[in-house]
Image (cartoon, rainbow, N blue to C red):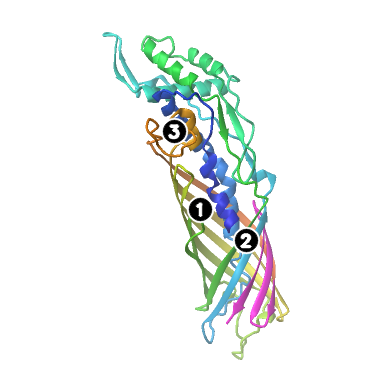
Amino acid sequence: MKNIITAYIIFLFITSTFSIAQTSSDYTVELARKFSRDLFETNGVPFMEPVVRVINSTSNSRFFTSAYIPQKSDKMYFKVGIHGMSGIVNDELKNYTPVMPAKEFDLNEVGKFINYNPITNQITKLDTASLIHYLFLNMMYDGTKGNNKGLIQVPGKASTALGTGNTQFLLPHSSIDSLFRSHPLYDLPLIPQFLKDSVMAAIYQFPEVFTLYGGTNLNYVFAAIPQIEIGSFYGTEILLRVIPPVNLGETIGDFAFWGIGIKHSLSQYFNDEYDNNGKRVPVDERPFDVAAQFVYQGTYLENTVGVTKAELTANANIFSFNLSASKSFKNIIDIYSGFSFETITIKSEYVYLLPVEIQWQLGLLEKPNHGSTPGFPGDKQPQKTNLTVSSDNFRWTIGVVKPIGDFDIFVDYSVSRFDILSAGLQYRF
């Protein structure tokens, strides 16, 4: 489970690092904040989606080993087991196509930042920092998709949280200068010279290189989950999974996991459990058994990461519907199979400051200090990003069970967008 959780929070480090002059204007610092957030929000979902896919497939494994559920039993029974899952991460899950934050120019949007009265030749409203940010996004659009396409190069691929290797966005000052002078607003009277000078100063102090960090280079994942099954009530079993709230150290933080499921026998409606004499028909003499199951799982993660004390809170909702069938062969071996539909949604809130390396380069902190000192207050404007990542999945599972007294040993393989090999041991009483 630790490998999965580590991949789950690696998106904390997608924020970029870059080099810049020691003296930076307030507009440059604000643009750096805004563009770092743009970069995070634009690439955060594709960066994290493979991790979500892996969590989805892994968390939704090991729900069933038998479709047989007695219509009634002499007493309540329990199955207590430890279920392990393992999957190989292929290259498809390690890379994605990065996106440059960009926005096509729309004159109607300019009114959000500046109002100009042509009669009095006066500006009645001006949000310089937001206007610079908007113009910068216009330039990114023009340089990647517009008339000046090619002045800004977007890398063809970047590492996901499961991959490795850093990816650089190159923003040459010469290209930014050309894009600004080509902007539709550049020669309009409503843009005064002091504003042009502010934009020029901001972009010439702005970094020429942004780096998206790679992931953890995971080649496989492994998880182990305790599970209890309780039956039977009119052919129905209850499944429980739980990892109580626990602190897993500085890397992971506080983590909790739980799940509840209901499995109901369908074969009881077309296969008689008792013969004409009222005698129970042994399971191995029944043609096969079929059951339907619905499971809900949830996770909670809270952590404080890095010297800037970035705060992460994340919750996952995981749903699975399973239709399974099984056949027992006289207490020698059982075979089971099933089709599943599963979905996961992870909602995260991330409160963060600029990374300390960026604060050094912007002159907000005095290197090598990690905290404020006289004249170097640090970044005092935390930003908040809400990120929602979802994934759906279909899977087919086939497996075998070997009963040994009151114990069951089982192994199965699931084929889906992320294949899983799972095995486990359970005790029946």
Question: Residue 208 location in percent, x, y?
Answer: 55, 24
Position above or below: 182 against 144 = above
- Which span of residues is magenta-colored? 401-429
Q: Which residue is drawn at 66% across and 71% down?
A: 326
Question: Residue 355 location in percent, x, y?
Answer: 48, 37
Q: Nearer the viewer, mark 3 or mark 2?
A: 3
User: The C terminus is located in which quarter?
Assistant: bottom right
Q: Could you say which disc has been placed on residue 365 in the image?
A: 3
Distance (Cα) linking label 3 and label 2: 56 Å
Query: Nearest the camera: 407 or 390?
Result: 407
Q: Residue at x 40, y 37 (%)?
A: 372
Q: Dot 3: within a 10 Å radius of its alpha carbon, few (fewer than 14), some, or many (20 or more) residues? A: many
Question: Residue 69 location in percent, x, y?
Answer: 58, 76
Please say whether residue 145 is visible from this viewpoint. no
Mark 1 or 3 closer to N-term? 1
Q: Could you say which disc has been placed on residue 250 in the image?
A: 1
Inspect the image, locate mark 2, and give the three-letter code of the amino acid beneath it.
Phe
Q: Which residue is drawn at 57% across and 35% down?
A: 212
Query: Nearest the camera: 150 or 176?
Result: 176
Is residue 366 rendered magenta in the image? no
Question: Residue 408 location in percent, x, y?
Answer: 66, 76
Q: Dot 1: within a 10 Å radius of its alpha carbon, few (fewer than 14), some, or many (20 or more) residues? A: few
Position above or below: 47 against 330 = above
Q: Which of marks 1 and 2 is in front?
A: 1
Mark 3 or 2 closer to N-term? 2
Q: Please, which residue is most extreme toward the bottom here? A: 277
Residue at mark 2: 339
